Image: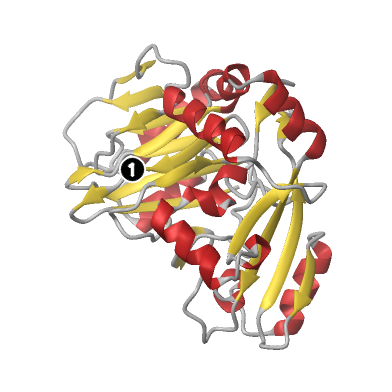
Amino acid sequence: MSITTKIYNELAGSPFIIEAEGPPGDFRLSELKEWKQANNDFFKEKLLVHGAVWLRNFGVDTVERFDESLQQFKTSGLLDYTGGNSPRTKLSTGIYTSTEYPPEYFISLHNELSYTDQWPDHLFFCCVTAPEQYGNTLIADGRKILQLLDPEVVEMFEQRKVTYIRNLHDGTGFFGASWQDTFETQDKDEVTEFCKKSNIDFEWKKDGGLRTMQLGLGVATHPVTKEKVWFNQADQFHASNHPPDYYAAMVDMCGGKLDELPQHACFGDGSEMSDEVLDSIRNAFKQLTVYFPWRKGDVLIIDNMLMAHGRAPYSGDRKILVAMS
């Protein structure tokens, strides 16, 4: 078995490819394991340099195969998605579907769980069913984003940080997520304990809903490379991320109170972020986004601090699995 390595393309933030030769579809776990053991330092170096590594033609196209392959790459136990803000289905211990938004929606680039104080180091994606058309996973290097942004904007986020606000209904609402789905439990006491342990300010509402507030970083320092990176989800949480008509309708339903929306972001001192600042962040991501095309059996490994990720709209079936460690 021959395994080749190369850079996807010369764009900044492009993943490093590790590809097996041979017929597509065959599960090549033994070859992958043997290569990883012989090239572990090389693999770690490429993941830090490129922010993402793309495994091709190893036949990792089921939950079971994905779980087996993860044993070679995860740095610790797999994490649950408790407290996450994206709709997912749990398929196995630590393995979920990717965000279950309608296919016509664009999912903006973000660092997973960067609004918490316990984010994953690495993300693992696996393609079970490739989309019929489009549906790329999008990635962008947070180091390059930082360099492209106006230094005043960077300083603003580095010094003032970001407050993330969520208003979760009690399971009977239709506007946003419920606290039961978000925290994967029906027990209020469990949610209360989780919030206390996770440094989440929270308030149980009279209508049975839950309001949470979390202070997150705007800019972070990678623990290994010591590089500064853009690391937050402010532009994604902010309601202006939605189409203008939908945004206006949401604000109207909440009586103009942005902090009553299902989710919202402001600076850590409570001040609002201007449209100009948010637009500059989104434009920086547009300039640096690399479109990652899926084939069945692909695995994409991302350093969650170095690389933001998102999703392009698509048509047809698409099934991407995700795990975090």
Q: Residue at x 62, y 84 (%)?
A: 186
Mark 1 surroundings within 10 Å by alpha-carbon count, few (fewer than 14), some (14 through 19), many (20 or more): some
* Nearest to the observer: residue 272 or residue 80: 272
Q: Position of residue 257 (x, y in %)?
A: 65, 65
Q: Residue 300: which quarter of the image? A: top left
Q: Residue at x 80, y 38 (%)?
A: 160
Reply above or below: 30 against 107: above
Q: Position of residue 225 (x, y in %)?
A: 70, 20
Q: Residue at x 19, y 29 (%)?
A: 22
Residue 143 appearing in the image: yes
Q: Residue at x 64, y 64 (%)?
A: 83
Residue, disc 1: 312
Instruction: Check disc 1 and give the amino acid type.
Output: Ala
Q: Is residue 32 left or right of residue 279?
A: left
* Nearest to the observer: residue 210 or residue 306: 210
State the SS at label 1.
Answer: loop
Reply above or below: 3 against 62: above
Residue 224 appearing in the image: no
Q: Position of residue 13 (x, y in %)?
A: 47, 21
Give the residue furthest to the top: 10
Q: Is residue 27 left or right of residue 64?
A: left
